Amino acid sequence: MSERIEKMLREYPSKKRYLKCLENQLRNFYGISDTEMIDAMCFYQPEGEQVQTSRVANKTASIALSYREKMEEINRDWYRHLGKQYEALSEEIRLFESALDSLSGRLPDIMRDMVVNDYTWDYICNHYHISRTTLGKYRRKAIQELEVLYEKQDVEMIDYLLS
């Protein structure tokens, strides 16, 4: 479990950046254009055996009749995929930040400065008037408390799913 929390501590800034990127993609979603869709359909070569039903290639007619429907379907599916990614990552970050705020004593402020605000250890030590050794101890204690909180959350989720 400690690995999961250590990983979240390390990856928190990049996850927040990716969440913002997903938010912008959803807000400014355009999908694929008509030209991109037609190009994709023109250069698509089905695999496997083919049976020719007529002497004239039907490719142009089939593209003209179906490209808009396929394009709309692809755009809907892509938008839905981005939305699911955004929701999952947003929930993961929300849970982590909530867990940080639930720590005991001075740990919420210190860990928020360390992880969320991405302050240096030197800045945190000066700001809270503690040594680097004490900061390391606080960090280890916070990880232990986070482990307990995440284990409780996992148990609650399992209980819910099994009920």
Image (spheres, rainbow, N blue to C red):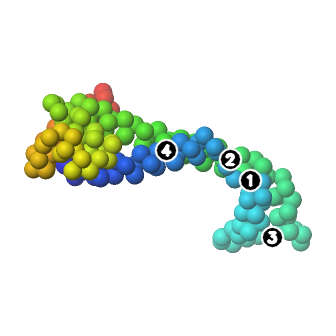
- Quadrant of the image containing the C terminus: top left
Q: Is residue 150 visible?
A: no
Q: Which residue is mark 1?
A: 33
Q: Which residue is mark 2?
A: 30
Q: Position of residue 87 (x, y in %)?
A: 47, 38
Instruction: Give the Cα distance between marks 2 and 3.
Output: 37 Å
Disc 1, disc 2: CB below 8 Å?
Answer: yes
Instruction: Give the Cα distance between marks 4 and 3.
Output: 49 Å
* Three-letter amino acid code of the residue under disc 4: Lys
Given residues 56 and 76, the one toward you in this image is 76
Label 2 packing within 10 angstroms: few (<14), some (14-19), many (20+): few
Task: Specify which label sits upstream in the sequence, 1 or 4.
Answer: 4
Q: Which residue is mark 3?
A: 52
Given residues 1 and 112, the one toward you in this image is 112
Instruction: Give the Cα distance between marks 3 and 1.
Output: 30 Å
Instruction: Give the Cα distance between marks 1 and 4.
Output: 24 Å
Relative to residue 158, is residue 22 depicted above or below? below
Task: Specify which label sits upstream in the sequence, 2 or 3.
Answer: 2
Q: Which residue is mark 4?
A: 20
